[in-house]
Amino acid sequence: MIQKEKIQRGRIDDEFFRLSITGKIDDILLLKTPVNLMNIFSEIGDRRNFVLIEGAPGSGKSTLALHICQEWAKRKLFQEFDIAILIRLRDPLVREAITISDLLPCTNKAMANETETAIMSLYGKGVLWVLDGWDELPSDLPRDSIINKLIRPGTSQERPLHKSTMIITSRPSSSAELHPLVSSRVEVLGFTPHELEQYFTECLEGDSQAVQTLLERIRENPVEGSCYLPLNASIVVNCFLSDNHSLPTSNHGIFISVVQSSLKRYLQDRLGKTTPVGDITSPDSLPSEIRTQTVQMCQLAYHGIEKNKATFTDNDLAVLRITKEISNVGLLQTVPSIISDGHLVYYCFLHLSIQELLAAIHISLMSPKQQISVFQELFGSPRFSAVFQFYAGITKLSTSRPILSLLPRFLCPVPATVFDLVRKVVKNEKEKGHGEPKPLLLSLINCLYEAEDSRLCVFVANLLNHNLHLNRTTMNPIDCLSVGYFASVCFNTSNGFTLSLHSCSIGDQGCKFLARGLSKCPNSNNDIPTAGIHIAEIIENTNSISKLDLSCNAIGNSELSTLCEALSTNTSLKSLNLSLCSLSLDDHGAIPRLLNTNNTLESLNLSSNVVGNTELKNICEALSTDASLKSLDLGNCSLTISDDNGAALYQLLNTNNSLECLNLSDNTVTSCRHIAAGLAVNKTLRRLDLYNCELTDQSIEELSTGLINKIESLHIWDNASITEDGMKTLARHLTTHCSELTLLLIPIHLRSCIETVFRDTNKERKRNGLPKINVYPLIDCDY
C-alpha cells in the first residue's frame, strides 16, 4: 500500500517514488510513501480520523477490510479501539439504517439499543468503523441515513459520532466526493512482480517450469498490464490450468472466461453434461440447460446498473420474474446479511466487473436505437465507463443484429447514433483544461482499442483536432496499449498530430505497451516484435508526430537512447518535452546526437533532470550549427555555471542563429561573464530565465554588460542575494540599451525598486525613444 499526501515538487529522485510509477496510482503530483497497515493512523495528528482506502477493481479492498477486523479480533491490530464494526455497504439493510442500532449485528434489538447508547455517550470514541464498498452504496442514500451522519462533516450536535474513527474502501472512480472529507488517502496497489511470481508458484504447486511458462506467456500478452490485480491474476492462472495453457487477451476476455468457466462447471458438476458452453454473448448458441439462467442473469445485472445497485433481494427477483435458481450457476452468490444476524439473505454477483460484463451483454442484445438510448441515460454515472468498455469489446461498436451481421463490414458501418454518443464523450472531456485528468476520454480510447475500428479512431481524432491531451490522467499498461493503438491510426491518417502524456505514470512498462498498441494498427509496420519493445519504435513508425510530451514519466536513460535515435529521422517533430523523466545525462550523448541529426525540432525541454556540465557542453556544441531550435529549457538540471565552465554558453549564444528562449533557472550561476559575452553578440534571443540561480549584485553587473541585443523578457526573480544596488546598476544600463525589452521580473524583496528605481528608468527610456519596461516582483508561488 501507499499513502498519498501533499504535493510532490522537484525532480523524481526517490527510489520508491520511481518504482511506484507503474500506472497504478491516481495522481502523480501527490507525494507517495509506502505505509504499513498498522501505521495508517500514525501521521494524522489532530485531524479527523478518516482514512480512505482506494484500489482498482480486484485489488483486494474487501479482503483487506475483513482482514483488518479479523486482526483486531485476534488482538494483533488497532488495539487502541474498544470495538471494530464491519459494515458492508452493499448490504440492502444499510440503505434503510437510520440509527446505529440498525447497523449492529446483534442477536436482539435490546442488545443493539444498549450498544448504541454506550457508543453515543462517548461520541463514538474508541469505535473503529470499517465501511467496505463506497462504490456499491446506492447514490440515492436518504439524507437521514446513519451513514451520512457518520461521514458528512458538521458540528458535534449534527454529528454526534465525531470522535469515531473510520476506514472506508472504494474504487477511485467513485470516491472523489470523499476526498475533501478524509484525513488520509491510501491505495492498495496489488501484486509487485515478485509477489505475482510467488502467487503463481503457490497456485502451480511449486512447478517452476510451469511458472516460467506462464510468466513468458503473460509477457507476450496484453493482460500483463492487469495481472498486478490479485483477482485478475487468479483468473489468468485458472485459465492457464484449465484451458491447455491458453490465456485471454483482453480485459473483457478475462471476465468472459470466468463466466464461461462457471457455466461449464455448472453443466458438468450439477447437470452431468459435457456439452460445450458456446458463445455467452449470443444466448442462442448456449445449451438449452443454461440459456434461460444466463439471460436472466444478464437481465438482473443490467437492472442493477440501471438502478445503481450491487445487491438484490428476493423482491427484486420477483419483480423481474427471475427464479432463485440462477444462484446455482455460481456467478450470483447468496449472502446472509450480517446486520440481520442471517435472517435476511441477499444476492450479489461474484464481482462488480462480472455484473458490468453481463449488463453489457444484455445491452448488446437490444436494438441499436435502444443501445444508444441506454448509454445516453447512463452517461456520467460511475459505472458508465466500465459497462461501455465491455460493450465495446463485445460489439466492436458496430451493429450486431443477426440479419445485419451477415453483411460485409463495409456495408454495415457504425450507426450514426454511436457517433453521437462518442461525440458527447469527447465534448464532455474537451471542456476540461489540458491539465485536468480525463478518465472518460481514456476510457473511450480503451473502447476504441477493444473495438479495433480505425474509422472510429479517425472520427475521434478529428473531434480532438488531432490533439490528444491526457495529461495527469494515470495510465496503466492496458491504457498505454489502447493509446498506442489509437495514436498509430491517427499518426498514419494526419499530418502534425500532438500526443501529450504529461504526468501519466507511464514508465518503462507503459512505453512497451504503447509500442505494442502501435503494432496492432493495419497501416503501421506490423513487423514490430511483441516483446523487448521500446518507445523508440513508436516514433520510428509514426513520422507525422509534431509534438511529443512525455514529461513527468519515469522513462530513464535506457529508453532515452533508443528514443533519441528514432527521433533523429522524424521529419515532422517540432516539440519534445522530457521534463522530470528521471534522466541522468552527464556525458550521456543521446541529446547531442539528436540535435546533430534532427533539423526540425524547435522546442526541447530537459528541465528537472540531471544534465550536468559535461552534457551541457555537448549540447551547446551540437546547437552551434543548429538552425531550427528556438526554445531550450535547462531549468533545474544540476548545472554550475562559472568562469571556468561557462564558455560553452558563450559558444552557443555566439554561433547559434535560431534560439529565442533560454531557461537556466534553478541552477547555480556563480558568474554571468560568459553569458553576457554571448548575449552581446547574439541576434536572436528574446527571453532569458535566470530565476533562483543564486545571482548577486556582481552577477547583475556582469549580465548588464551583455544586454545590448533585442532581448524582450528577462526573469531574475527569486534571487535573494540581489540588493537595490544591483537593481540600480541594471536600471542605469537599461536607460539606453535593450530596445526591445518590455518585461522584467525581479525578486519580491526588491518590489520597492519599481517606484524608486525603474520609474525614472522608464522616463529616460521614453526620452530615448525606447519602449516602457513592465517590471513585476515575483515569488515562487506566483509563478
Image (tube, helix red, strand yellow):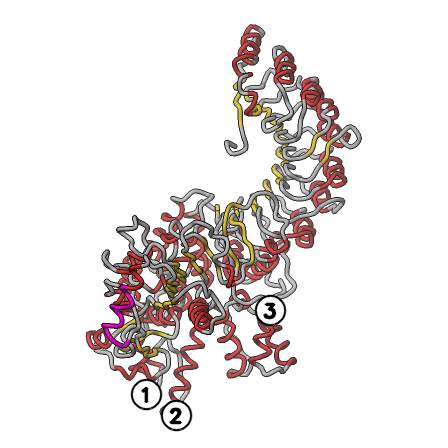
* Residue named by callout 1: 289
Q: Position of residue 544 (x, y in %)?
A: 56, 47
Amino acid on which the number 1 mark rests in the picture: Glu
Amino acid on which the number 3 mark rests in the picture: Arg
Crowding near the residue tagged with mark 3, few <14, some 14–19, many ≥20 C-alpha atoms within 10 Å: some
Amino acid on which the number 2 mark rests in the picture: Lys
- Please give the name of the residue rendered at 64% of the width and 76% of the height, measured from the top-left corner: 212
* Residue named by callout 3: 219
Most foreground residue, 22 or 218: 22
Residue 110 drawn in magenta: yes
Q: Label 2 near label 3: C-beta < 8 Å?
A: no
- Please give the name of the residue rendered at 69% of the width and 39% of the height, measured from the top-left corner: 638
Classify mark 2: helix, strand or loop: loop
In the picture, residue 18 is in which quadrant?
A: bottom right
- Please give the name of the residue rendered at 46% of the width and 74% of the height, measured from the top-left corner: 74
N-terminal of the pair, mark 3 or mark 2, is 3
* Residue named by callout 2: 273
Residue 285 visible, this orientation? yes
C-alpha distance separating marks 3 and 1: 38 Å
- Decide: is 82 above or below 636: below
Classify mark 1: helix, strand or loop: helix
| Magenta extent | 107-117
- Decide: is 147 above or below 46: below
Residue 468 visible, this orientation? no
Residue 490 drawn in magenta: no
Q: Position of residue 242 (x, y in %)?
A: 51, 83
Q: Label 2 near label 1: C-beta < 8 Å?
A: yes
Q: Is residue 762 left or right of residue 310?
A: right
